[in-house]
């Protein structure tokens, strides 16, 4: 009897494509994404490369040498030829985790510093490099900052060695490479809303988790529509003096209210127990939350049109939600992913919503400045809604 029951259930599982997706495809997705992000160990593995913005205003040759040294320590310099002001504005938008400004007198100061070190004068001039850090991704920025320090020591040591070899024909003395100073500044400093306390784990985690879990509203929306369609409730509602849009809008509103409560709960928990600083505009945070909820509920409507039964869409919803959460940066920084996946992440509404939250909460930007991100989330939501209305059937 036990074997017969097991045989029957096995047949049911094998006929349920959504269950097979959940059992077999979901682990592969997790392993693939996390493997791409963290599987960089081993003999033939490539080291993680972090992309950084660089403006080289140096009139000498050492600025170019520093850029080349960055490449050797796991950084990928992206040159900004417009100037330090443009680079600063791009950094404020969170385009890269780190920005480097090499001043015009960098080579001159570095040559003077190494000469003074050789002559053992009392005052050694430092060559300085300005570093801008994106506070929204402190883990990645910290890694890039450490690599940049290694690059500066390499350049300074090379310059010192050249002069020492030319003058005395000997190797450099120890401690002679610490002659390049990094002036590190977060991109949200000096904007009038700088935090007095350092960023907490809540500051970096809550924005991503708020987006990730709100989009699971799509599961509830889809399940409700599928269940009521199977029971014939939707068809009976059509006999009432209400339009199709009003019926769907009412269901979206109900789930949307749940999404609002969920968001309030998460932010409240973050403030009370995870050190979340609500440093940005409460109005801005509210607008972002409502926009994200709109996209999530319309996505649920669209998913409901993809299958005829609840069982058919369960695996689909789980797979879509997990994949979007992984590649969008909600569960881990996008910079940990290969560059191709980083670009691909913007095909998800999650990525745009997350950037908007980070602009308000972590970069201390205004709601107006992050409006393009919100418009993209609204565009996703509107597209989901239009497709859902065209595809949806009541029986």
Image: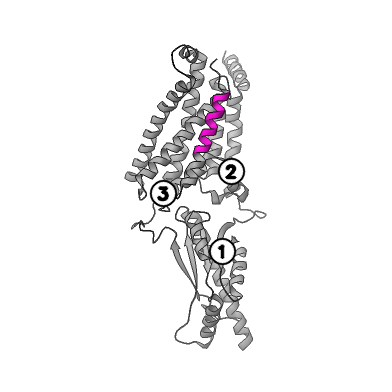
Which of the pair 10/144 is nearer the observer? 144
Dot 1 or dot 3: first in sequence order is 1
Q: Residue at x 49, y 65 (%)?
A: 131
Helix, strand or loop at label 3? It is: helix
Q: Residue at x 49, y 54 (%)?
A: 94
Q: Residue at x 36, y 33 (%)?
A: 261
Residue wearing tag 1: 82
> How far separated are the C-alphas under marks 2 and 1?
35 Å
Q: Residue at x 56, y 63 (%)?
A: 82
Q: Report x, y in % for residue 4.
A: 60, 14
Front label number (1 vs 3): 1
Q: Main secondary structure of the magenta part?
A: helix
Q: Report x, y in % for residue 252.
A: 44, 27
Callouts 2 and 3 close, C-beta under 8 Å: no
Residue wearing tag 2: 33
Please tell me whether residue 128 belongs to the stretch shown in magenta. no
Q: Is residue 308 above or below residue 143?
A: above
Which of the pair 155/394 is nearer the observer? 394
């Amino acid at each position: 009897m036990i074997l017969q029951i097991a045989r029957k259930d096995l047949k049911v599982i094998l006929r349920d494509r959504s269950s097979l997706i959940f059992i077999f495809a979901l682990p592969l997705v997790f392993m693939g994404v996390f493997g791409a992000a963290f599987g960089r160990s081993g003999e033939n593995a490539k080291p993680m490369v972090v992309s950084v913005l660089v403006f080289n205003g140096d009139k000498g040759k050492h600025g170019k040498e520093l850029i080349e040294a960055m490449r050797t320590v796991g950084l990928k310099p992206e040159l900004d030829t417009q100037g330090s002001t443009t680079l600063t504005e791009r950094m404020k938008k969170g385009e890269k985790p780190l920005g480097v400004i090499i001043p015009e007198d960098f080579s001159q100061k570095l040559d003077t510093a190494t000469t003074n070190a050789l002559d053992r004068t009392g005052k050694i001039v430092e060559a300085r490099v300005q570093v801008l850090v994106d506070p929204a991704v402190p883990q990645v920025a910290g890694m890039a900052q450490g690599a940049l320090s290694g690059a500066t020591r390499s350049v300074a040591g090379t310059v010192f060695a050249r002069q020492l070899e030319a003058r005395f024909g000997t190797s450099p003395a120890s401690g002679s490479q610490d002659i390049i100073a990094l002036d590190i500044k977060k991109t949200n400093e000096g904007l009038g809303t700088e935090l007095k306390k350092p960023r907490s784990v809540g500051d970096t985690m809550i924005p991503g988790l708020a987006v990730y879990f709100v989009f699971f509203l799509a599961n509830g929306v889809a399940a409700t529509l599928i269940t009521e369609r199977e029971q014939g409730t939707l068809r009976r509602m059509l006999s009432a003096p209400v339009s199709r849009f009003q019926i769907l809008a009412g269901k979206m509103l109900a789930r949307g209210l749940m999404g609002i409560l969920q968001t309030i709960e998460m932010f409240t928990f973050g403030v009370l127990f995870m050190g979340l600083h609500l440093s940005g505009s409460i109005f801005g945070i509210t607008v972002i939350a409502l926009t994200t909820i709109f996209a999530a509920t319309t996505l649920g409507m669209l998913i409901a049109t993809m299958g005829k039964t609840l069982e058919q869409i369960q695996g689909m919803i789980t797979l879509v939600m997990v994949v979007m959460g992984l590649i969008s940066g909600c569960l881990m920084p996008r910079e940990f992913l290969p560059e191709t996946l980083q670009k691909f992440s913007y095909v998800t509404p999650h990525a745009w919503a997350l950037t908007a939250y980070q602009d308000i909460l972590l970069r201390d930007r205004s709601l107006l400045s992050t409006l393009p991100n919100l418009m993209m989330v609204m565009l996703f939501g509107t597209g989901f809604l239009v497709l859902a209305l065209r595809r949806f059937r009541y029986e």
